[in-house]
Image (cartoon, rainbow, N blue to C red):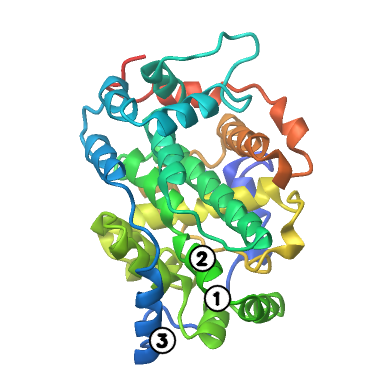
Amino acid sequence: MVQINECPPSSLGGVLASCPSSLRHNSAYDLSKPPRLNGETLKHLRSKIHEIPPMPEIWHRIQQILEQPDASAGELGTVISQDPILTAQILKVCNSSAYSIPGSSEISNIPLAIARLGLDETSNVIFKSLAPELGQSEKMRQQVRYIWMHCQSISCLTRLLAESCQRLERHDASLIGMLHDIGKLVILNLETDEKLAQLKAAIDSGTDALQAEYEQLGYTHIDAGVILALHWRLPKKVQHFISYHHHTGTQPVSSIPKELQHAMMALNLAHLIFDHFAKDASTMASELVWSGHCCGFARVNESFITGELQLPIESAAFYRQLEGEVSRIKASFPDLFEAAKQAASVPNKLHGRSFQSLPNQPI
């Protein structure tokens, strides 16, 4: 078996071997025994979160469809077509430069648009379209936009990693990637500019992000994410994913419930991959509250990555797939990336290949 330190630079193993500075030391915030929230803090957090509008019923109907193993573009399209705003958004994204092939005709049919995007990417577009707008000032709206970009990127990469793993459903991988950091949206929506500035200063000084949140706010984005997930009636497994999405940074894999281990390892790998390809590319990195925070592993579990996730760590082709996925995301958010125009020139064949590999999806 090829070892990580034997992999070529242009491979997933090379990415892992090249980022020792990302590997985390023990955090001051103990995820194995997280501190209890102060009663007043919890009451304040719950009351503020319940002021956020709930997710529309159509989103829950769409999730019920996507949970079915035989879900199809036609069935999903029937539900989407009932909402003109959703229909317009799906067509807009489908025909954007990030997804359309140069010279191809514009798609105006929803099932065909879903076929081009793929079911899970369509779900991400729908969620982002339907989620209540968070972020009060223009500055905060840009931060919210960056977090949505980050979540969409991690969702796409986690889904791509899931293709090699028989024990991680693509839809689960996509969903947790999209929703793992929704607690940060709550923080941006609830807290004052002064509080956010204090939080940013603490993180930038080197304090672990969760510890900084707890010290400055009295709660973490994990706490806020779980409460929002309950308010939005998100699936219980999403609530569990949010609860454990930082564990691989400071805890051994064995500390995570077995049914969540593959998703959490893939999620953290997706963060490392995104950081590798998008490092220093953001036009607003210095303005972000969480810009000083980096992901990593308490210990790189090589046997889990190659054995359980079954990832081809030495493959140059797989590396190019990952790189192309990040380039496509950057092209979708040109205002957030300096090199977006260059990214837009990357051939857009990955998404089509990924979608066509899914069973029971008519094209």
Q: Which of these two is toward me, 309 or 326?
A: 326
Instruction: Tell me the quarter of the image containing the C terminus.
Output: top left
First in residue order: circle 3 vs circle 2: 3
CB-based contact (under 8 Å), mark 3 and mark 1: no
Frontmost residue, 280 versus 181 = 181
Is residue 4 in view? no
Q: Position of residue 235 (x, y in %)?
A: 26, 54
Mark 1: which amino acid?
Glu
| Label of residue 191 in the image | 1
Q: Amino acid at mark 2?
A: Lys
Residue 114 point in image, percent of width and height: 40, 24
Circle 2 — which element?
helix
Between the residue at mark 3 and the residue at mark 1, the CA separation in whole angstroms equals 12 Å
Compare residues 39 and 265 and report the one nearer the observer.
39
Eye-nearest disc, 2 or 1: 1
Residue 229 is at least partly visible in this image: yes
Which amino acid, mark 3? Thr
Q: Check whether the beta carbons of the residues at disc 3 and disc 2 lie within 8 A of each other.
A: no
SS class of the residue under badge 1? loop
Position of residue 193 relative to residue 42, above or below, is above
- Whether residues under marks 2 and 1 lie with C-beta atoms below 8 angstroms apart, the answer is no
Determine the secondary structure under disc 3.
Answer: helix
Q: Residue at x 38, y 90 (%)?
A: 40
Residue drawn at (57%, 75%), measured in percent from left and top? Answer: 209
Q: Which residue is mark 3?
A: 41
User: Separation of disc 3 and disc 2 at Cα?
Assistant: 16 Å
CA–CA distance in space, label 2 to label 1: 11 Å
- Mark sitting on residue 184: 2
Please say if 97 is above or below 177. above
Image position of 250 with respect to 356: above or below: below
- Is 109 left, or right, of 167 in this rendering? right
